Image (spheres, rainbow, N blue to C red):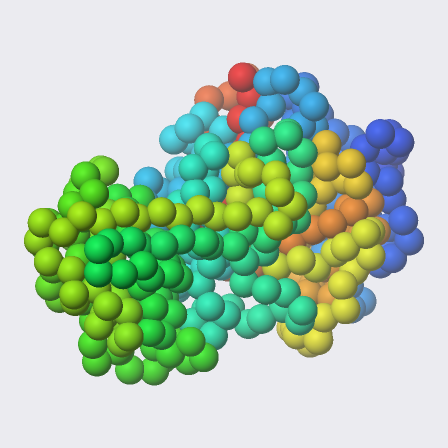
Amino acid sequence: MRAGTWARRVLTVAVAMGTAGFVATAALATPAVAAPAGYDGVSHREFSTTAGGRPVMGDVVEVDLTKPKVRVDLLDSGVLASRATVSDMANDVGAVAAINGDFFDIGRSGAPAGPAVMDGTPLKAAVPQGRRAAPPVAGAEPDYVFTVGQDGKARIDRLRLEGTVTSAKGAWPIVALNQHAVPVGGIGVFTNAWGAYDRARTMCGSDADRTAPCAADRVEVLVRDGTVVSSGPAKGGAIKPGDTVLVGRDGGAAKLRGLAAGDEVTVDYALVPASGVAPRFAVGGMPIVADGVAIPNPISNRERAPRSAAGLSADGKKIMLVTVDGRQSDSGGMTLPEFARQLASMGVHAAVNLDGGGSSTMVYRAPGTSRVSIVNDPADKTLRLVANSIGVSIG
């Protein structure tokens, strides 16, 4: 049993992997792994390896997207500006496995940083890098996502927000969708997916500094059935289903202030995939493996910590969800470059880094049981509330 709060088995067993799945290559110490066992198309196993001369324990959930009953989707608490545990998210929908998802606006709204798509519905767009709590990954843009497309294949993609507010008084670009940070001078859109968190605070900070003061000029406009209902100061409170709230800061506020009750307004927006394949689901994440090779990355070269990632096979038909434990007496964690190399050594063709540290959580529901169990060893004493997760369901 580990010294951390969460007890688990320590396994040191050889592994044999089929050629149709993930093929191991040389990198860090080859992990010792338990033989997969579980559902048709979904399995969990533990592995052990070393990094920096210390043991590291990890967990893997493999998902075969070609199995007709397997479904992968985004899970959250019910609204974007809120958090829940990975266990609760999974149990709420009857998932058999889940891993924590995107970095989030910690200590504030709790909303995720990157784009989000659930069950084919675009929920939010990417927050500017300068307004995120997490450090940037070299060469990665904020709109990168891990996704399963409508073609049933997993991929690393980019989701660019395109949208326009159109009225008789002008046509203006939309630069934010349900985001905890509206870019300077821009107009953002909020729907009932956002939640009740104060929308005025989404217009605080600059595009380069999340701690910068709030915009001096902030306004919001409520649109219902294509008609302006009201205009005034930005505020909090839940948005009714079907209603749309437009917010503007600085120059964006000046444009929206020209709208009055009774004006007809058209609000059009979409998350446009760089691949051209519409997503069934998408979660924000920064690429750390491409073409089976770890992407060089200068950050976190010294800090070994718990990590989470989502990876895929070269044909996009299989997914690998991976956590490594850290900050434990029997698991020292990994730096981000070490983690990327470990994923590549496990046969991952491409992968994104998900939120780590105390957020790293993996749950799995053993066949014949009704609720998931925590299978990794989270670093925090209590299970952390997170913005979203990747959930795997059967049936």
Q: Position of residue 66 (x, y in %)?
A: 70, 23
Q: Is residue 196 visible?
A: no
> 38 and 62: which one is in front?
62
Q: Residue at x 54, y 63 (%)?
A: 142
> 196 and 35: which one is in front?
196
Tell me where residue 50 sits by quadrant: bottom right
Q: Is residue 312 visible?
A: yes
Q: Position of residue 63 (x, y in %)?
A: 67, 31
User: Of all residues shown, which one is farthest toward the right?
Assistant: 26
327 relative position to 294: left or right = left
- Up-down: is 340 above or below 274? below
226 relative position to 64: left or right = left
Q: Residue at x 59, y 18 (%)?
A: 69
Tell me where residue 148 sits by quadrant: top right
Q: Residue at x 10, y 58 (%)?
A: 260
175 relative position to 272: left or right = left
> 231 and 77: which one is in front?
231
- Up-down: is 367 above or below 92? above
Q: Residue at x 48, y 48 (%)?
A: 271
Q: Position of residue 169 (x, y in %)?
A: 22, 60
User: Of all residues shown, which one is farthest toward the front?
Assistant: 168
Q: Quadrant of the C terminus?
A: top right
